[in-house]
């Protein structure tokens, strides 16, 4: 598989993780007593994924 295609696939995977965690956050916040630990963990994971996307995007641009 080409390097650019692999990087794009990894970026798409990170974006899907972000979307899944955002949905979990919305669902948890609708509960009468949302778990702050779960919310904090998902938010932390979203930030990690955003950093990974930024890193992969830089690598993708460097390839061109």
Image (tube, rainbow, N blue to C red):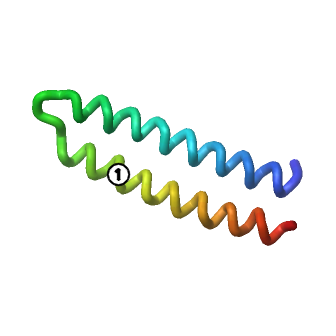
- Residue at 18% from the left image edge and 28% from the top image edge: 31
Q: Would you place residue 38 above or below residue 52 in this image?
A: above
- At 82% across and 49% down in the image, what residue appears? 5
> Percent position (x, y) of residue 39?
27, 45
Residue lying furthest left in this view?
Answer: 33
Pick the quarter of the image with the C terminus: bottom right
Residue 61 lies in what quarter of the image? bottom right
Residue behind mark 1: 43
Tell whether 34 sits left or right of 4: left
- Left or right, 42 with respect to 32, comes to right
The residue lying at 36 percent from left, 56 percent from top is 44
The 10 Å Cα crowd at callout 1, few under 14, some 14 to 19, many 20 or more, is some
Whether residue 18 sits left or right of residue 44 in the image: it is right
**Image location (x, y in percent) of residue 10:** 67, 50
Q: SS class of the residue under badge 1?
A: helix
Along the viewing direction, whichever of 54 and 1 lies nearer the viewer: 54
Q: Residue at x 31, y 50 (%)?
A: 41
Using the rendered view, name the quadrant where residue 25 is placed: top left
The correct choice, above or below, for 58 with respect to 9 in the image is: below
Q: Where in the figure is residue 58, as x and y percent of width and height?
A: 69, 68
- Looking at the image, how many numbered discs can be counted on the residues? 1
């Amino acid at each position: 598989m080409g390097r650019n295609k692999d990087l794009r696939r990894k970026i798409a995977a990170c974006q899907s993780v972000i979307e899944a965690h955002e949905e979990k956050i919305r669902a948890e916040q609708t509960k009468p007593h949302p778990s702050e630990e779960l919310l904090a963990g998902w938010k932390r994971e979203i930030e990690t994924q955003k950093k990974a996307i930024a890193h992969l995007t830089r690598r993708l641009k460097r390839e061109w």
